[in-house]
Image (cartoon, grey):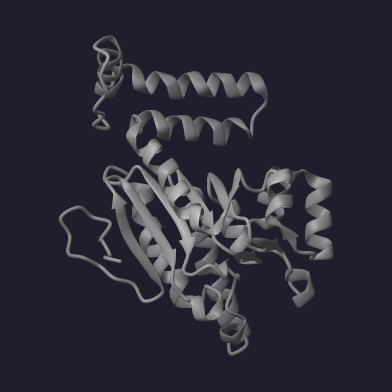
Amino acid sequence: MAAYSLKQGSPVKTYETILVDEPSPGVLLVTINRPEVSNAFNTQAGRDLFDVFHPLEIDHRRYRCVVLTGAGQKAFCAGGDLKERNTLTEEEWVLQHELMERTFRHILNCPIPVLAAVNGAAYGGGLELMLLCDFAYASSTARFALTEVTLGIMPGAGGTQTLARAVGERRAKEIILTATPFSAAEALEWGVVNRVYEPDELLPKTLAAAERIASNAPISVRQAKHSIHYGMQMDLRSGMMFEIEAYQRMVHSEDRKEGVRAFVEKRKPVFQGK
């Protein structure tokens, strides 16, 4: 796949551990490309993902949706590369984890939607990575687990927070404290993923959803995502007040005018993100 820089007009940029592609206008496809180690992320993968997502938090004009997946069909991401971590000093371990924490926060804070296409095992930090995305589709062969307590550590990339918000406190405690893997069907039933597809359908279906998002008004999509995310952390009355503040940002936009005109004229709108 061709790799693209995140800055329009910039030279093409490639990465050591990930592939970056633009399969359709406005859709950024990011593939963790370490299939020989089940797409586990090492320090370089942390740097590469940081380099992709950090600019998106600031400049969100070129892309309208991101799809995150793993190379091959065996694994989405097996979490941290334990062979590399076994060579690290305690200080290096702390610094590497600080890098991953910052990278994951940029994914969480990304103003444009981030979708996960979970093409295989999502274990440890791989599941935490998926849970930071706005929503996820999974292959029927995918497996999920947070196994950190079997290694003398605990989830440290948001897993104790994001999983509990997705499945509830009691089930999150069962998953994390027993470290028991669960299936794609269970992930769907519990609300960890939104849909399950056969392996060869997964990426096309996820990209189709991303293309639908990218065809909608970009300011509207960003504001709706913003309102849902932060409103869920408030009581209902405060959330509704927050929502109307987000709504008012669109009233004077050209996209709002274009959307109404296109509806009246019975044509597809052309949104510019203005």
Q: Is residue 270 above or below residue 241?
A: below
Count of marks, rendered view: 0
- Residue 179 as seen in the image, left or right of residue 264: right
Image point 34% across, 16% down: which residue?
Answer: 251
Image point 55% across, 19% down: which residue?
Answer: 241
Q: Quadrant of residue 182?
A: bottom right
- Residue 224 as seen in the image, left or right of residue 21: right
Q: Is residue 137 above or below residue 242?
A: below
Task: Give how far across and how far down residue 99 sits, in percent.
Answer: 50, 68
* Quadrant of the rendering where the N terminus is positioned: bottom left
Task: Give how far across and how far down residue 201 sits, in percent.
Answer: 49, 53
Q: Quadrant of residue 118?
A: bottom right
* Quadrant of the rendering where the C terminus is positioned: top left
Image point 60% across, 52% down: which residue?
Answer: 131
Q: Nearer the viewer, residue 196 or 226?
A: 196
Image point 53% across, 74% down: which residue?
Answer: 96
- Residue 176 as seen in the image, left or right of residue 45: right
Q: Nearer the viewer, residue 78 or 250?
A: 78
Q: Residue furthest top?
A: 264
Task: Give how far across and how far down residue 13 sits, in percent.
Answer: 25, 67
- Residue 41 as seen in the image, left or right of residue 4: right
Q: Is residue 239 above or below residue 100?
A: above
Task: Give how far across and how far down residue 261 sits, in percent.
Answer: 25, 13
